[in-house]
Amino acid sequence: MTPDALAEHLLEGLHAQLPPGVELAGFELEVGELVEVDVAALRVELERRAPGVEVVITPVAGLLRCLDCGARYPPDEHPCPVCGSGRAEIEHGSELGVKRAWVRQRDMPPAATE
């Protein structure tokens, strides 16, 4: 998914969950190191599409677990540094999603006077 399509998808999902009377003030996005996304371009798209919304991007380091010996190790040490097996599963680093979001009360127009 391109950074602009991803930004649109994330923001649509966030806005769809907002209760009436509030607006998105900011959010924290976790991006795993194994996710193939241009984080800088994604940030630019998010900030362009949601001006005034605080965007916090938190990287998540990759971690693999060997399916043969159970050792845990970073992806750049693959195959397993303990037993040499190439069989592993991803434990961390494939995350891509909103960890938390915060909102603020929407400015209400002044009441009409007679």
Image: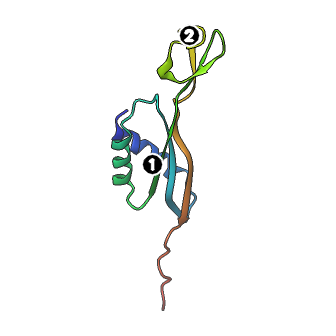
Left or right, residue 94 beside residue 72: left
- Residue at the (50%, 58%) spot, across then down: 24
Residue 72 location, quadrant: top right
Given residues 106 and 55, the one toward you in this image is 55
28 shown above or below 74: below
Task: Characterize the local packing of mark 2: few (<14), some (14-19) or many (20 or more) Cα atoms within 10 angstroms.
Answer: some
66 shown above or below 23: above
Q: CA distance from mark 2 to mark 1?
A: 36 Å
- Residue at the (40%, 29%) spot, across then down: 36
Of labels 2 and 1, earlier in sequence is 1
Task: Characterize the local packing of mark 1: few (<14), some (14-19) or many (20 or more) Cα atoms within 10 angstroms.
Answer: some
Given residues 6 and 90, the one toward you in this image is 90
Figure quadrant of the N terminus: top left
Residue 34 locus on image (x, y percent): 46, 28
Residue 70 locus on image (x, y percent): 66, 15
Given residues 80 and 23, the one toward you in this image is 80
User: What kind of residue is marked 1?
Assistant: Leu
| Label 2: element kind | loop
Residue at the far right in the pictured view: 70
16 shown above or below 84: below
User: What kind of residue is marked 2?
Assistant: Arg
Residue receiving disc 1:
11
- Residue at the (52%, 49%) spot, across then down: 28
Residue 15 locus on image (x, y percent): 49, 52
Residue receiving disc 2:
87
Given residues 52 and 33, the one toward you in this image is 33
